[in-house]
Amino acid sequence: MLRVAVVGSGPSGVYAAQTLVQQGEVPGVRVDVLDRLPAPYGLVRYGVAPDHEKIKSLTGNLRSVLEDDRIRFLGNVEVGGESLSTARLLELYHAVVYCVGAARDRTLGIPGEELAGVHSATAFVSWYSGHPDATPFDLAGVRSAVVIGAGNVAVDVTRILARGAPELEPTDMPHAALGVLAASELREVSMVARRGPSQGRFTTKELRELGTLPGVGIGVLAAEAALDPAYADPGAAAALPAVARRNLEVIRGWAQAEPGDAGEAERRITLRFHLRPVEVLGGPEGRVRAVRFERTAPDGRGGVSGTGTYEDIEAQLVLRSVGYLGVPLPGLPFDASRGTVPHAAGRVLRDGRTSPGEYVAGWIKRGPTGVIGTNRPCAKETVSSLLQDAGALAARGGPAGDPLDALRAAGLRPVEWPGWLAIESAEERLGHSLGRRSVKIPDWAGLRDAAGLA
Ligand code: NAP
């Protein structure tokens, strides 16, 4: 028997577990999928926006993998903490695949970023997704917000800020977060990109959705968008990748000559381009009052350069959405410049040499890019490496007994699959009691209680 631990139960971890048992090359493979949280599914549960039900429904596929007889979910198990080091984990299993994602956000590195009212998009996403480590948001007094960045996360947070409560109510958003968003007096969200409309990192479906929100107007300043040569010149646009061409088409459809014309809309989204953030400006109480941007111009090589002209956009809430960053796991090597674990085809490298039995997949392997499906081939490459090494791994000598006993002996209290199902049922009951569908339990005590650990 080959015992493998997969650390992280998001898409990359689940796909790694699935590939391990489905390759069939090692008949006796058994996989434990460990997660720090009592609940599985990683960013599908705690990152995919609650109003994106179709992507959320992917949990159905992930669930059937975790219910496979050869796979065991063990939540509430932190690896790299006091009770369970990475070295100890490797004693308990023949191999360990780290699929721990990229838990931190990138910062802007500009003055004023620490002011009250400036947050990372990841903190905002964690809050409305009911992550038990999230800090509550207070939107009192917020009438305009600035979102910095032009990726799909920026689109997600812009959309959630602009959406009305009736559309969020049917989701599984925690009740407190729903209440805060419902009471919000936010009227204007500016999503600001430092480059042009053809260089946004968003996908077209997500971008287009911003123009379909009930009661929400959308606008783009035509003159600003036209700073991007591909916006105005069909010849330049023709040379672009298909997604950029489609994005341009959508953005052209929203162009307007003057700012601020949102008709009858209750709220308004404005996409801004060619503006890079240089400073967050504070008011008298140390809260953000505006963001200062420098106008940029294309540098002819795909980048932009500053023009020395500035514009302040008023905001009482600023969300920076400029990408995720991997976090070092104690005991594992880490490339701080890339925010990833060094590897060769998924095999962890220590000082340039393969570390026997240790593997990586997902964002901690390749960086925080790609959609959920990108994790499939990524996990497959890693598992192929692992299975090629299976003979040598088995020869290392097997773990003595069931690793679960060792985890318990170390003082850990794993949440097994029935514990997770109990959380799911408790969330359904909570939703029912609130007149909603299933509603997330957003705190550690509530999750552990529901799992029967109290
Ligand atoms: P991302 O796609 O890498 O986008 C980051 C954005 O931040 C880019 O527009 C980038 O601009 C900008 N940026 C970086 N540094 C900046 C700075 N100092 N000042 C101003 N702007 C800056 O990251 P993400 O949005 O966090 O998404 C992460 C991954 O998750 C992506 O692969 C995304 O597609 C995926 N995702 C998918 C979905 C979905 O499919 N619905 C939803 C959420 C996330 P430049 O291009 O100029 O560098």
Image (cartoon, rainbow, N blue to C red):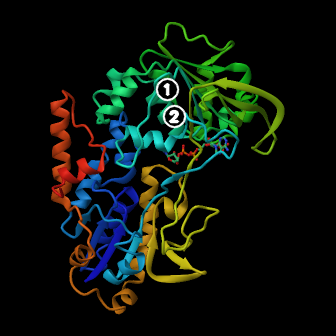
Identify the residue shown where x is 21% and y is 77%: 405
Q: How many marks?
A: 2
Label 1 amino acid? Leu
Circle 2 crowding by C-alpha within 10 Å: few under 14, some 14–19, many from 20:
many
Of the numbered discs in the image, which one, if any, rests on residue 98? Answer: none
Compared to residue 53, the image places residue 402 above or below, namely below
Spatial separation of the CA atoms under disc 2 and disc 1: 8 Å
Hey, which quadrant is residue 404 in on the image? bottom left
Q: Give percent across and percent down for residue 213.
A: 44, 21
Amino acid type at mark 2 = Val
Assess disc 1: are there few (<14), some (14-19) or many (≥20) residues with their C-alpha within 10 Å of its C-alpha. many
Q: Secondary structure at mark 2?
A: helix
Is the C-beta of the residue carrying label 2 under 8 Å from the nearest atom of ligand 1?
A: yes
Q: Within 8 Å of ligand 1, the CB of disc 1?
A: no
Q: Between residues 352 and 283, which one lies in front from this camera angle?
A: 283
In what quadrant of the picture does the C terminus appear? Answer: bottom left
* Residue drawn where x is 29% and y is 51% of the image: 444
- The image position of residue 356, as x and y in percent, is 45, 84
User: Marks 1 and 2: in contact by CB < 8 Å?
Assistant: yes
Give the x, y percent position of residue 184: 43, 22
* Direction from residue 193 to residue 17 in the image, left or right: left
Residue at the farthest top position: 264
Residue 115 horizontal/vertical position (percent)? 60, 37
Q: Quadrant of residue 136?
A: top left
Please give the residue where the numbered disc 1 appears in the rendered image: 210
- Furthest residue toward right: 308
Task: Choose top left, top right, bottom left or bottom right for residue 127.
Answer: top left
**Residue 385 in view, yes or no:** no
Q: Earlier in the sequence, mark 2 or mark 1?
A: 2
Q: Quadrant of ligand 1?
A: top right
Residue 155's label in the rendered image is 2
Q: Secondary structure at mark 1?
A: helix
